[in-house]
Image (spheres, coloured by chain):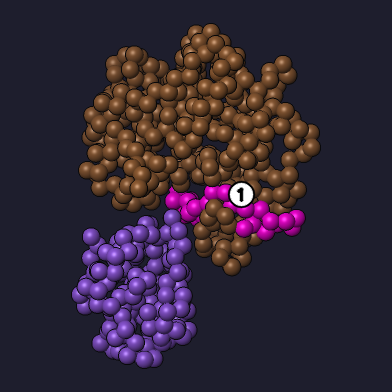
Amino acid sequence: MSEAPKDLKYTKSHEWVRSEADGSVTVGITDHAQELLGDLVFVEAPETGSSLEAGSACATVESVKAASDIYAPISGEVTEINEELADSPEKVNESPFEDGWLFKVKPSDAGELDALMDADAYAAHVEAES
Amino acid sequence: MTTLKTTPLHAAHQRAGAKLVDFAGWEMPLHYGSQMEEHKMVRAGAGMFDVSHMQVVDIHGPRAQAFLRYLLANDVAKLKTEGRALYSCMLNADGGVIDDLIIYWTGGTNYRAVVNAATAEGDIAHMQQVAKDFDVHVEPRPEFALIAIQGPQAVEKTLPLLPEDLRGAGDLKPFSAVWNDTWFVARTGYTGEDGFEVMLPAEQAEGFWEQLKTAGVNPIGLGARDTLRLEAGMNLYGTDMDDRTNPLTANLGWTIALKDAERDFIGRRAIEQWKAEGVPERMVGLVLEGRGVLRGGTRIETPVGDGVVTSGSFSPSLGVSIAFARIPAAVDAAELQADIRGRKLPVRVVKPVFVRNGEPQVELPKN
């Protein structure tokens, strides 16, 4: 069973969200998602400064096996992307919740966070899907 | 729910933490952790594959050669030395590919074929049907386990573990085999590297597998098997060709022996007609010039109409995406466009062999 840290929020499409002290949120894909995808070879992150709408496709991760869309867990402006993934996409496999983060967003409506799942709900969701 | 078939190495795969998937009705290892790492191990050292789902079929009887010369598109009369092997397609009357296989001459009126798992049942039925007109027996040998050991260190690591009377296998030329009463060792493979394919009694398979592991041969899943064969320029049945594919459009023309005009074989008339009319498509290799991955089904735009990717992946050895594609025969452009989920990216047309013995065979894009 793959881990899902308690301090994060989750989407049904297997993204995670971490609320940072400065009010921004960090977004990545879960351990379960990277395991399903297998070795990542490319990460197409959204552009810094672009605005995202919760639930819309905003990035692509591509593994040896398949390409997969990443959906914005929350609306807002992209403030930073993980530049290291351009050369080392395998960081997403090795460290999905830490070094393998994808991008940061300044939320336009922090209330949207409440609609996301906690770790227990996400674990139950993964269980139900498999 | 149908129950998946398992090989004699199933327990070993489970112990090794393999991700097991349904492959043609068999529960087989996709990978043991990382497909990418496994791929690289085969190119740099040695890896082993459980290919026991493939089916061994022995053919024997006074007219075995005549039977096979009629059954197969390649000509077994080319096999002049005992133990030599040939790659061939088995065609239907319309020239479509029923399966591709390796056929060994094991001396006298005896031959041994190895066919694909997904097609095995139909292959055997077809062979037995055709055999009715010849005095031959078609005998499936499901009691064998098959292990492929591949990579630059495969031969040196495997030799000491073979039965003593088969260690001459180290001197085997490619596409040749030696055997004793129970084991059969061939210098063949599906990776573009040196190595062996070993058939052995099922009950000895796990012991041999564990000995190989101790010797530093890593278990490799079907995921890496697919990227290795793609880099090596080898077709996959069901993906690059099937029973509706004209083999001349699947880079298989070299395996069809038309030289002996006296020899009739199933599908010959269709092939000759296609040759006379001109083949509408051909299969090429593609290297993607940009970030993305070509996949089976990716549309390829050419000046004279669309082509399509039959097999595509990221190449772990080259660090770029590569593919086989079927394109209109008239295309002579060296650069085409791939439509990757709406994005148009340039692809370069190359001979469909990307890596051999660890060495790149194509020029890589400068990024």
Name the residue located 58 percent from the left edge and 40 percent from the top edge. B242
Name the residue located 45 percent from the left edge and 83 percent from the top edge. A52
Magenta part of the chain: B299-321
Above or below B211: residue A47: below
> What kind of secondary structure does the magenta stretch mostly adopt?
strand
Q: Which chain letter goes with mark 1?
A: B
Secondary element at tag 1: strand
Name the residue located 64 percent from the left edge and 50 percent from the top edge. B349
* Count of marks overlaid on the render: 1
Label 1: which residue? Answer: B325
Rendered location of residue B46, percent (x, y): 35, 37
Q: Which chain is brown?
A: B
| Image-quadrant location for residue B44 | top left
Name the residue located 39 percent from the left edge and 91 percent from the top edge. A108
Left or right for A6, reference B130: left
Left or right for B260, reference B47: right
Residue type, numbered disc 1: Ala
Rendered location of residue B347, percent (x, y): 61, 57
Rendered location of residue B356, percent (x, y): 50, 39
Q: Which chain is purple?
A: A
